[in-house]
Image (cartoon, rainbow, N blue to C red):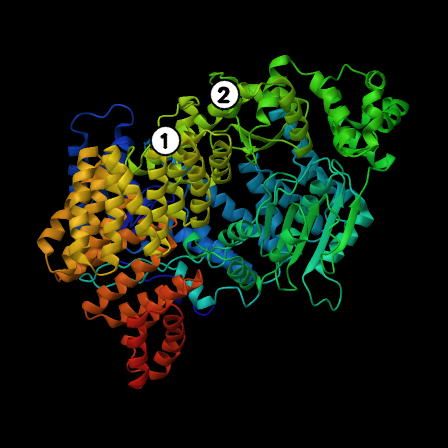
Amino acid sequence: MGDRSQELPDPSPLVFRVLGPLQVHGPVGPLRLPPGRQEVILAALLLEVNRVVSTNHLVDLIWEDNPPETARTQVQICVSRLRKLLAGADGEVSITTRPPGYVLHTDAGNVDAALFTTLVLRARRLRERGELHEAVRLLRDAVTLWQGDCLSGLDSGPLANKARQLNEERLTAVELRIRLELELGRYDGLVGELQRLVHEHPLREKLRGQLIQALYWSGRQAEALEAFRTTRRFLAEELGLEPSRELRELESAILAGRLPAPAAPAPVSASVRVPADKAEERTAAPEAEEESEPTAPPAPESVRQDAVPHQLPAAVADFVSDAGQLAALEEALTGRPGRTTVGLAAITGKPGTGKSTLAVHVAHMLSETGFPDGQLYCDLRGTTGTPATPEEVLGRFLRALGIPGQLIPESLDERAEMYRTRLASRRVLVVLDDACGEGQVLPLLPGSRGCAVLVTGRARLTALPGAHRVELDVLAEDRALELLSRIIGRERVAGEAAAAKALVRTVGRLPLALRIVAARLAARPHWTLASMVQRLANERHRLDELTHGEMTMRASLSLTYEGLAPDDRRLLRLLSMAQAPTLPSWLAGALLDDRRPFPSDLMEPLVDVQMLDVAGVERTGGFRYRFHEIIRVYAREQLAAHHTPEARQEALARMAGGWMHLAQQAHRKVYGGDFTVLHGDAPRWEPPDSYTDEVLADPLAWLDAEQASLCGMVEHTADAGLHDLSWDLATSLVTLFEVRGHYDLWEQTHLSALAAVRKAGNLRGTAAIRASLGSLYMSRNQFDTARQSLTSALDVFQALDEPMGEALCRRDMALIARTSGDDSSALELYRRSLADFDRAGDVVGRAIVLTQSAHIRMRQGETAAAQSQLDEALDIYEGVGYTGGRARTLRRVGQLLLEQGRSDLAVLTFTEVLELCRDSGDVIGEGHLLRDLGHAFVIMGRPDRARDFFDRAVTAREGVMDFSGGALARLDLARLLDAEPGRSRELLVPAVEVFRERRMGRELAEAERLLATGY
């Protein structure tokens, strides 16, 4: 790595410490900070160094629940005094006002918390490359920065939460460093330190496990076992808990004499890892600059370029294995000697035999050792009426591999080519669950022999080339008894051995049937196994069919179903209408029209008897559920038998109304209100307010997580004739589709809704869908199609006197005119759109039009008019809290500042927008802003800085396969490198190919001219 002095930024005259008591060290020693409010404000600014901290947040930190009326004024006074204090210390630091609050600007390396985070991040990357010694050294350096608990002695409850988070990160770094030293074989030297850490942090089981390992591999086996027993006693006495599974496995391995030594991970392949110098550039704090120069942002992180997906569902804890089966699957997937193709295995069998369970178990077993570059997983829905298409699956996988939605191509062949390219040098395991046939699987196969694919399905999948096949049947008796023992307890099975064997035989040794029966026994410990055998024998006319495919499952399922309370049976039937992969708890309330505050209470009786599975936990702390597909089929049969079509339609409307309410609230949170969207009149069903507030704390994250459910509901309501809900939900989801680039889902949902509203003669809904499709076609640069769709929608909206619809259509038609160079038509359309938005009372719509039309004013040299429009737009966005609109408008402000010759302010503005893009995950926006910063530094006469930003723009755009954006940045960079003809030619040759392929005539002509002049 070279000299350590080259790794860390040069210190400025001021150094800030928050990892311990709050301290500021100036050039002549410590600065005295007035205790109280100024300390709290400075600490808050340092924890978010170079980022905006809102005034409201600072007020909350100081006064919490009861601020005085003069709170904001008092914060301003404190900030002013801090500015004077820091300015008097002659340091390269400043506090600037940046709506909605303040930013403390300094080199991030001068704040110990930021430096700690940087060092830990570098250490993790070094570990990935196999450089363990250097990673350990950096982790030691990081922990040395601490001088006690974070912000110790500072009295602020909200800040204490952030301090606790940093304290936790410190312990995590210590645990990581110890893990690496164990991998390096430094057992003896760690024992004393681990004993001290366990004493200081007795509840951290990871530290206890590391102590046990260190003792064992130091030759102190008896002490290692005693450390485990001490842990067991402590946890039992203090918490009433048993040690974790990992600790119990350590004890078993020590007793068996087969505890493997900790092994260092294999270095990441050179073809995918980030070069050391580039990794340093991304993570190190920027070098200090002269005071007159504006501070530029650090280079973007490469998490999308090196995205490592971990998509596997949780493995089943009570899995029973066939050692030979597992070994054969491992060999097929990880590779036989001389294999030149992708590893491929297929698990098939009749329903209920555990295909998915086996696949997930094998995938987890091989994930770290065999496939360190990640695991992709998708339920292909082969047994449902709507199997996943290869295009849909490839879109999901490409996003997981770091490709933004906007850059994913439309065609299957192009998606497959990008997918294979992305996996070419990686070792990734792909699990394709519930395939309907070979045609669904073949486009999803990688081309690299380093990858492997594990497929499950009911069909035999005999046409998959070179696949190792495993066909599951019912369990052998010994494995069936083992499964029963794991669920209800070994003592209970051993106490009734004969009855246990009879029970296993009675349910036909089918895993699903056995799990259902065992669940009833586990829930009723007073029942004997013999009594359960007798109960099953009384229903032999159904259970005798357990060995005959799907019909056999109906008997076991009806046994459990009939044991449910009437309301639980009704809920099970109605839940079967939901087509979502997992079910949130509020669905139970909607389907039963039950408005209790904790609707999960309605689901739990079904979980108790394993008619529903717990699939995960939401951010609210509530659970998500899912059906086993066979149980869903059975429940649908019962639905048809017990509910009239009218009753089913009413329940479906309530369920769809719940999704509609949540989607509408998510849109409001993103835009600051019900702006820029039309809604229908269909009734909503509102989940509990507390649930809605918590689950929509991050509305875009919720929309992302529920994407499949929401899109499925659009199609479900369309098919069911609930046309008003279908079009309303589809257009509300554009909030997600537009930000994430889900253009295929945008089209798919809208075409389904369009068919429904046309069939119903719903003119307003038809126009709304056509207008939204017009926006989609614009995003795809299909301007003629977009214009036709928007024109037809506008005609209907005018006939209906619908000002919001007219405004949306004219705004998008203006954008088409502006893109084609017809500025006069665009301005007239914008003028009329403004009037329409004003009639509709939509201030965000007005702000969007002001921002877009300001760009034309800038091009025409009307800077004063452009500035006025941008100022008004910013006021609107800040008033409603719409961050996305504010970012787009600020970018135009930065461009206007450049035209006015105010380059320093332009750089600061672009920097702020860049941070907003990073916070929202907008990779395309990052690329735009990096180019904007490059152009700013060209104008400022700083070609060195401009070159740096253009270089970063090339990396950022091409890193996510945005080759046209990368080519533009290459052209920018080539203009600066007239003294380096070889480098310029290297940049321009691939750019010319892209410009020619994408028909970018103006750029192609300039690139060819530069090449011809000797570049």
Q: Which one is nearer the viewer's eye here, 799 or 122?
A: 799
Q: Is residue 982 visible?
A: yes
Q: Can residue 92 be seen in this view?
A: no
Provide the residue designation for mark 2. Answer: 650
42 to 439, vertically: above or below: above
Snapshot quadrant of residue 986: bottom left
Tag in front: 1 or 2: 2
Graded by Cα atoms within 10 Å as few (under 14), some (14 to 19) or many (20 or more), the crowding at tag 2 reads few
What amino acid type is highlighted by mark number 1?
Gln
What residue is rendered at 37% in x and 75% in y?
992
**Position of residue 957 measured from the top left corner of the image (x, y, whole percent):** 39, 62
What residue is rendered at 70% in x and 53% in y?
261
What amino acid type is highlighted by mark number 2?
Glu
Q: Where the C terminus falls, by quadrant?
A: bottom left
882 to 395, vertically: above or below: above
Figure disc tally: 2
